[in-house]
Amino acid sequence: MSDQRRREMLNKNRERRNFERQIERLHDDHNQKNTCVCTSMWTGSMVNGCWKEVTQMTPMGNVSKVVVGRGKRPILFHGAIVAFGNPDDREYDAVPESYFRREDPCHAKHSFHHTAVGQPATKQTGTLYFVGEESTGYIKIQWHSNKEEVWIFANRVEDTYAVKGSQTKLIGFPPP
């Protein structure tokens, strides 16, 4: 076995052990048994991406992603550890919360209509930043009127929240 191959295997095993320690720590912090949840997360770009079924191994919390390289510090963020593949040969990854599928009510404006009024929609992702578009965040939404799924600028989406019972109040945009 070559030195390069051995180094790759060592890094992969180290990364796996790090994820397994985080899984144990997060379950201990939340006083939970090892309960796994099947869920969907967005993978890829806006154009070539898709929803992928994964196993969420931890509840949402502060997780770290190991960066390969000497002297590199792990990246800490709010998210969960997910597992891909069979339980026998499982690969783990730390994923930010914004990549997980959600069904949050919101109001959104069409992207290039400056005088647009906020329309009811459902937010399907959090704010995602794609390669080449680091300064602009996008959110995937589904319009209530025609069920069309689109990516729009994050500043064109506002959350709604319940005030009393079934009444909702819009934050930011005037009601339609």
Image (cartoon, rainbow, N blue to C red):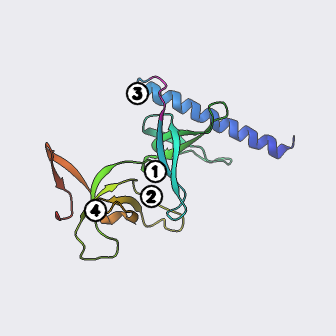
Q: Which mark is residue 59?
A: none
Could you tell which of marks 2 and 4 lies nearer the N-terminus? 2
Could you tell which of marks 2 and 3 lies nearer the N-terminus? 3
Q: Which residue is mark 4?
A: 145
Residue 90 in view in this figure: yes
Could you tell which of marks 1 and 3 lies nearer the N-terminus? 3
Q: Quadrant of residue 150?
A: bottom left
Q: Secondary structure at mark 3?
A: loop
Q: Which residue is mark 2?
A: 128
CA–CA distance in space, label 2 to label 1: 7 Å
Q: Is 67 displayed left or right of 133 in the figure?
A: right
Q: Which residue is mark 3?
A: 30
Residues drawn in magenta? 33-37
What percent of the width, then of the height, locates residue 40? 47, 45
Q: Nearer the viewer, residue 134 or 101?
A: 101
For badge 2, the amino acid type reads Leu
For badge 3, the amino acid type reads His
What percent of the width, then of the height, locates residue 141? 36, 59
Could you tell which of marks 2 and 1 lies nearer the N-terminus? 1
Residue located 49% across and 31% down the image: 36
Determine crowd level at label 3: few under 14, some 14-19, many 20+ residues with C-alpha closer than 10 A: few
